[in-house]
Image (cartoon, rainbow, N blue to C red):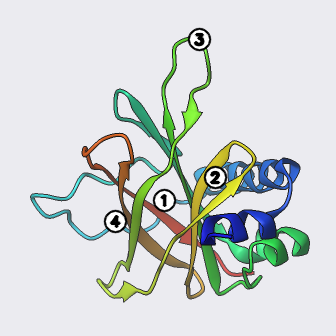
Amino acid sequence: MNENNVSASRIGHTPRLASLAILSLLMASLVTGCDPGPTPPQASAAAPAVEPDTASSRDFGEYVVYFNALRTDALTPEIAKMNNIARSANRALVNISLVKKAEGTTGAPVPGAVTVQAVNLNGQSKDLTVREVREGNAIYYIGDVSVANDETLVFTVDATPVETTSRLSLRFQRQFYGK
């Protein structure tokens, strides 16, 4: 059994993915109603601009990249356990998915090479490794990172769908409020 099949067998059924997606969207809506907070570090000439705080996807023509980040204590204990994620006010989950557009449909998830880097507003890099999760037809990439109370992180996502050599890059930021 390969690593992806092992991960998929640990994750469970599609309703669990739906729960994770609903939690991600709920957290995104909560964040959008909050103060935007400090300005992120300035982008270098090669780095894309930071997406608006209300954004949860970016259209790249043939592909759409969906993204979100939320504190892991917002996950249910069951979802956290199935995904081997520690629930904590000091950890954040990053969730990325790649969808290839198909006319007349919502598109099809596609695998790819996905990396995510996280930096706080002081320019300090955070350790973050993403892993692929396959659940039914769904394919997404998750990783978790430490966060301090009221810390804002800027995430840089680089994704290359397997069917192309085009790199899809975006940046987004989220502030993680303490209890």
Helix, strand or loop at label 2? It is: helix
Q: Which residue is mark 4?
A: 39
- For the C terminus, the quadrant is bottom right
Above or below 109: residue 160: below
Depth check: give the residue in front, 19 or 178: 19
Residue lying at 13% horizontally and 64% vertically, measured from the top left: 44
The answer to which of marks 4 and 3 sits earlier in the sequence is: 4
Image position of 37 (left or right of 139): left
Q: Are marks 3 and 2 in contact (CB under 8 Å)?
A: no
Helix, strand or loop at label 3? It is: loop
Residue 36: which numbered mark, if any? 1
How far is mark 4 from mark 3, CA to CA? 39 Å
The answer to which of marks 1 and 2 sits earlier in the sequence is: 2
The answer to which of marks 3 and 1 sits earlier in the sequence is: 1
| Crowd around label 3: few <14 · some 14–19 · many ≥20 (10 Å) | few
Above or below 38: residue 96: above
Residue lying at 36% horizontally and 78% vertically, measured from the top left: 119
Rendered location of residue 80, percent (x, y): 80, 74
How far is mark 4 from mark 1, CA to CA? 8 Å
Q: Which residue is mark 2?
A: 28
